[in-house]
Each structure stands twice: as C-alpha cells, then as structure tokens.
Image (tube, rainbow, N blue to C red):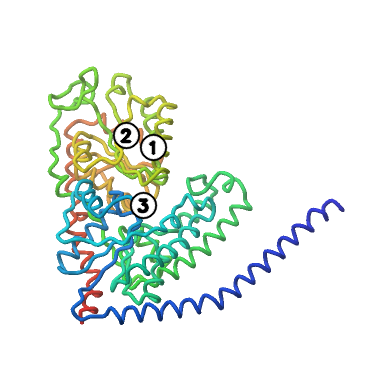
Amino acid sequence: MACFSCIMDPLWIAIKVLTILLLLLLCVLSVVLPVMIVTSRKHFRKKREMESNSDKPISVAFFHPYCNTGAGGERVLWCAVRALQTRYPGTKVVVYTGDLEASPEEIINRVRQRLNIELPEPVEFVYLHKRGWVEADNYPTFTLLGQSLGSLILGMEALNAFLPDVYLDTMGYAFTLPLFRYIGGCRVGCYTHYPTISTDMLRRVSSRSIQYNNSHYVARSPFLTGGKIIYYKMFAWIYGIMGRCAEIVMVNSSWTEEHINDIWKIPLKTHRVYPPCDTEDLKKVPIPIADDEDFLISSQSGDVKNEMGKKLIKIVSVGQFRPEKDHPLQLRAMYQLRQCVSEELWDRICLVFVGSCRGSADEARVKDMKDLCRHLSLENNVEFRVNVPYDELKKELQEGTIGLHAMWNEHFGIGVVECMAAGLIMIAHRSGGPQMDIVIEEEGSRNGFLAADENEFAIAIVKILRMASKERRSIREAARSSVDRFSVKEFEKGFLRSTAPFFNQIST
C-alpha cells in the first residue's frame, strides 16, 4: 500500500501542475489573443486603405506552399490560375509558395513541362520561409493539430507579405481561412481536395486498424485508442469552425463533398468541381489492336518487349510517393500475382511507378519501396519513374495496358482518370472517389475494376490478362468515353462559376 502511495503521489502532483499550467494558458489566451486580433485587424485595415486605388487591378492570392511538385493538386492550382487570367485579364495573380530553391522561371517551366500548362499572363510569387511549420515530420504526435496550428504561422507570414483582395486556399489549410477573412479583410474561398479529418478516420481508429496514421502501439491499446478518438472529435469540431469561415467552398468529389458537408455544415456554399484531368491530350494516345491471345502467345511489332523478345505487359501506377497512396499494397499485389500466373507470363509483366517526390521523406519512401521489392523478389518486374516530365508520363501510359491505384479513400483520383483517358484498364481501391465517381463495374457498362486488398488486385489483373482482346478493348473504350466530365474545360467552367461572386462584388 505504501508503495502504491509512492507511485500515485508524484502522479497527482504532475496532474495538478499540468492543470494549473493549462488554466494559466487559457487565462493568458483569453486576454492576449483578443488584443492581438483587434490590433492586427486594425493594422491590415489601415494597410488596405492606404493601398486602395480605383485603378489598381483586383488581386487574387493562391495559398499553395508546395506549388512546384507537379502533382494532381498542382494541376488544380495552375488550371485555376489560367482560367482566371483568361476570364479576367489584367488580374494580379499571386501564389504563396515555400519552394525557396526554385526561381519563378523554374516553377513556370516545370508547370509547362510536367503539367503541359501554358499561362497567358505572368504570375507573381511570394516566397514563404516558414514552411517547416506545416511539415508533418515535425509533428510525430498530434500531427493534424500541429500542422493546422503551424499553418496559422505560415498564413500570418503570407498575410504580412502580401494583402490580396481575394484569398483562395488550394491545399486544404482551413485554419488560414479565418486569418485572411477576419484579420486581413479578404474575400475568402477554398478548393478542398480532402477533409483534414473525416468520419472514416474516426471509424478506423475505433476499429483499432493499424494504418500509416494509426500506429500499432495506439491500435493495440484501448486506453490510447480512446484518447485518440477524443482528440479526433475535438479536432473535427475546431476544423468545422475554421471551415465555416469560407465564403465559397469547392470540393473535388462526391466523397469529399459528403464529408465536408458533414463537418463544415455549409452545403449551400459548397460546390462540387471535379479536378482538371488532361483527358483531351491523353485520349489521343492510340489503343493497340491485338490478337485474342496476345498476352499468352503472340507479340506485335512495335510493342515494348522483354529480353526474350516477347511483348512486355506494363502495369502503370501514377501518383505521388506519399504514404497514403499505399504503394506497398501494390507490391504485395504483384507478389500475389506471381503465384497466379506461369513463370513465362510473369517474366513479361512489369509494374511501373510514375510519381513525384516532395522532399527527402518521399525520396526515403522510394528507397524503402525498392528494398521491399528486393525482399519480395520483385526487383526485375518493378520500375520507378520519379519526377519525370509530362512527355515521359505520356509515353509510359501509351505503353501500358493496366492502371493501378491502391489508396484507401482517395478523395478523387486524377491519376485514375488519366490512366483511363489514355486507354488503360484501371484497377482502383474500392473506396472514396474512384468508387463513387469514376469506376463503373456493372457488366455491359464496365469501365474498370475495384479491389480492396492485394488478393483482389491480383485476381483483377489475372482476369484482365485472360480476357479476349475484344473484351479488353471494349473496357478501354468505355473508360475513355467516361472521362469527359473530368476534363480541363469542365473544371474551368465550374471553377469560374463558383468564384464569380467574388469578382462581381469587388468590381461593383
């Protein structure tokens, strides 16, 4: 009993000290924070009055700290910029970026080379030096809260550097919305690719599933799981308050719209605008005409071949090298596939990963994937294409037969649509945007396949390989004809329609 008392006394002391510190912090914030808000608001109001000029063009600022990565989110950014410049010529467009190592010329050249986008007018860049505050690596625990609070610091740097008329967050930093609206006095909108937190995340934590964002030691502990659920629910409540500060909300899919409406609760301000996919150019990629048994026996002239001279069957995976894309699941699917096909056929199969790396963490992830390939004895059947230009991406898609995408609850899936536009037979995860918006599995109108684990992915690949050429071609053509609603033109129409109130009200 004495021993138990020895343990509990320091624990109660620690709890009391922590409680006192929290109360002091709340007292300080209740006094200091309102003063800071009022003072800052007066400062920016005065700054706006000093800069007001009837001849000054409307300024639009996009908050996109990673604008130079060349992925799907960046395609949204630059297509939005091009749409605004075309519809409202002379508008001053500014991009807040943390890509300090890249000059404006280098960023624009990368947009041209990687995304095949030409801008009609110049863009100004405001370089942010505090991007480290939103890096996930800096928050090994409480990552969502850490990054969100860090975005306030990064947002304040952006606001101090340039005060726009219209502020558009295109990366999902909802905590910056009240900053620019109530302190900066800007018109505020956002394009949300995915909610920072969702009810699906809560369900996964509740079921104690081990995932990249739910470590094994949390999943195995009922106490830690309960604490994480409370943390997630509190964060979701705060996230909802921040999101409701947006005057216009654009979301990229039915799945994202459902979750944003559930958390932000402003459905009348929320518009579904599918992201721009380069469907027109990719639809020009020719679909090869093959014999019924081309994968099992024959090879065609002009096809990519392996060392034995037989047609190489390419499976292409397009997506950034991020943990949520679940590239390891695709490698495990390849391992399962090897058990299902003959060695002769296996020697002709190659999985090609095409994607971009944002930094050292993503580069380390690619290295880990290569190690996993060696561990699974897949190194001769897997290739990596990192940070490739658009022409090389197009070449890989042209040579591919099957597309692979394994992210659970992918918010939309630009890579999925691009593969389908190029005529690949897509196998995507049975969840999120691919399931709700893109892939149709009903026989007679099938345009792809859905799978939930490595076994289902492997089975789908085998089914495609065993199909008659005519059946494969039918699915390819169905996939290609289904992607027009995700075109750049449709995105621009939806984006301009959603943001029109900002420009109408400012101009009047």
Question: What is the CA distance from the residue labelled 1 to the residue labelled 2?
Answer: 8 Å
Disc on res. 366: 1
Which x, y percent locates residue 163? 32, 72
Instruction: Report if residue 269 is visible in the image.
Output: no
Give SS at disc 2.
Answer: strand
Mark nearer the viewer, 1 or 3: 1
Front residue of 388 and 452: 388
Q: Is residue 111 left or right of residue 334?
A: left
Neighbour class for label 2 at 10 Å: few (<14), some, many (≥20)?
some
Mark 1 and mark 3 lie on one chain; the one further toward the N terminus is: 1
Neighbour class for label 3 at 10 Å: few (<14), some, many (≥20)?
many
Above or below 139: residue 184: below
Instruction: Report if residue 473 is visible in the image.
Output: yes
Question: Do the residues bearing badges 3 and 2 touch, measured as CB atoms within 8 Å?
Answer: no
Q: Amino acid at mark 2?
A: Phe
Q: Amino acid at mark 1?
A: Val
Question: What is the CA distance from the residue labelled 3 to the residue labelled 2?
Answer: 26 Å
| Residue at image point 23% right, 42% down | 389
| Residue at image point 33% right, 30% down | 382
Front residue of 241 and 467: 241
Question: Do the residues bearing badges 1 and 2 touch, measured as CB atoms within 8 Å?
Answer: yes
Q: Amino acid at mark 3?
A: Gly
Q: Which residue position holds label 2?
A: 384
